[in-house]
Image (cartoon, rainbow, N blue to C red):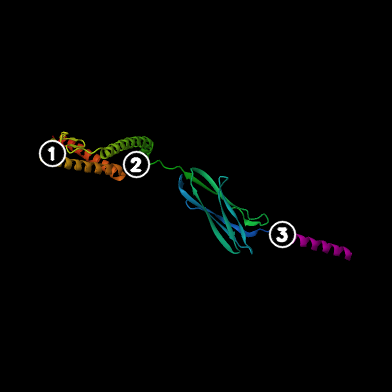
């Protein structure tokens, strides 16, 4: 009888020794998501609005925990945030979102915290929200968008035309550079003939040449030739200098357009 009671006591003690540790080990660790700890920065949203989801994780256990808070939107992973907590600490996690039209449901779960670490709050409550459609643009915005679209579509044609025009102008410029350079490097004019100017062709005889010089013709020809050469040198400098050439061309075009505008105004007044 006493032996039977001893066996019963031993069996009960063995059972308690096995069940109690298992129950302790199976008890959730007081850590994870705080109850109801999922919210959004805006409650009224339209498509295209920027919003942020927030949640709080805590650790009231005696040890450290770490893991990933995974945010899910309509059953699809929206993003995740890693956390690492020491005993007795909390952390706020956030994830930005650009709202899309329609009804949505959002929740967050803890992953990668270790399969041997049962947490008290592995999943947040699910929040439901509805995003309204974006309002139609105002007439001013619609006009601006249409103008921008028109400019964008016309830009290739404008660029092509501008490139062709600039190429033609530069081709003429290069031809002018060669012509002016050739005029400067060519044979010098005789005293009675200036480059590009027909004055007086001196006879080949020395007497005629001496007679021409007596009247000052040689001095006039040399002065005109020097002036013409100086003009060609200055013109060549402008043609070969990119900044001076395009600035001079722009100034010339501006002056011509102003003159044309003045002429039209005078005609209207009359």
Left or right of residue 236, residue 147 in this image: right
State yes or no: residue 84 in magenta.
Answer: no
Q: Residue at x 59, y 54 (%)?
A: 68
Mark 1 or 3 closer to N-term? 3
Q: Is residue 198 above or below residue 126?
A: above
From this viewpoint, is residue 14 visible? yes
Q: Secondary structure at mark 1?
A: helix
Residue 151, given in percent of the width and then of the height, sits at 36, 38
| Residue labelled with disc 1 | 210
Judged by depth in the image, the label closer to the viewer, 1 or 2, is 1
Q: Left or right? Give the position of 138 relative to 121.
A: left
N-terminal-most mark, 2 or 3: 3
Farthest residue toward the front? 206
Query: Is the residue under label 2 in contact with that under label 1 (CB below 8 Å)?
Result: no
Q: Quadrant of residue 244?
A: top left
Residue hosting label 3: 23
As measured in the structure, the alpha-carbon distance from the residue carrying label 1 to the one carrying label 3 is: 134 Å
The answer to which of 155 and 9 lies nearer the viewer is 155
* Residues shaded magenta: 1-22
Instruction: Classify mark 2: helix, strand or loop.
Output: helix
Q: Earlier in the sequence, mark 1 or mark 2?
A: 2
Label 3: which secondary element: helix
């Amino acid at each position: 009888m006493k032996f039977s009671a001893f066996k019963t006591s031993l069996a009960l003690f063995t059972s308690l020794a096995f069940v109690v540790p298992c129950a302790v080990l199976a008890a959730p660790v007081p850590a994870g998501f705080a109850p109801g700890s999922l919210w959004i920065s805006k409650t009224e949203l339209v498509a295209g609005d920027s919003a942020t989801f927030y949640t709080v994780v805590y650790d009231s256990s005696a040890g450290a925990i770490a893991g990933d808070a995974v945010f899910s939107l309509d059953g699809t992973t929206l993003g995740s945030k890693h956390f690492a907590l020491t005993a007795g600490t909390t952390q706020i996690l956030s994830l930005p979102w650009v709202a899309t039209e329609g009804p949505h449901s959002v929740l967050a779960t803890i992953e990668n915290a270790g399969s041997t670490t049962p947490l008290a709050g592995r999943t947040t409550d699910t929040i439901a929200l509805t995003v309204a459609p974006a309002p139609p643009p105002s007439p001013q915005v619609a006009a601006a968008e249409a103008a921008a679209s028109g400019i964008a579509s016309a830009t290739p044609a404008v660029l092509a035309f501008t490139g062709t025009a600039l190429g033609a102008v530069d081709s003429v410029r290069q031809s002018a550079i060669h012509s002016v350079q050739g005029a400067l490097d060519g044979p010098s004019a005789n005293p009675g003939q200036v480059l590009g100017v027909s004055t007086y062709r001196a006879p080949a005889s020395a007497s005629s040449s001496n007679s021409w010089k007596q009247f000052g013709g040689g001095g006039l020809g040399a002065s005109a030739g020097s002036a013409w050469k100086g003009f060609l040198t200055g013109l060549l400098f402008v043609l070969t200098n990119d900044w001076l050439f395009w600035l001079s061309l722009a100034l010339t075009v501006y002056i011509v357009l102003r003159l044309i505008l003045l002429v039209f105004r005078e005609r209207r007044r009359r």
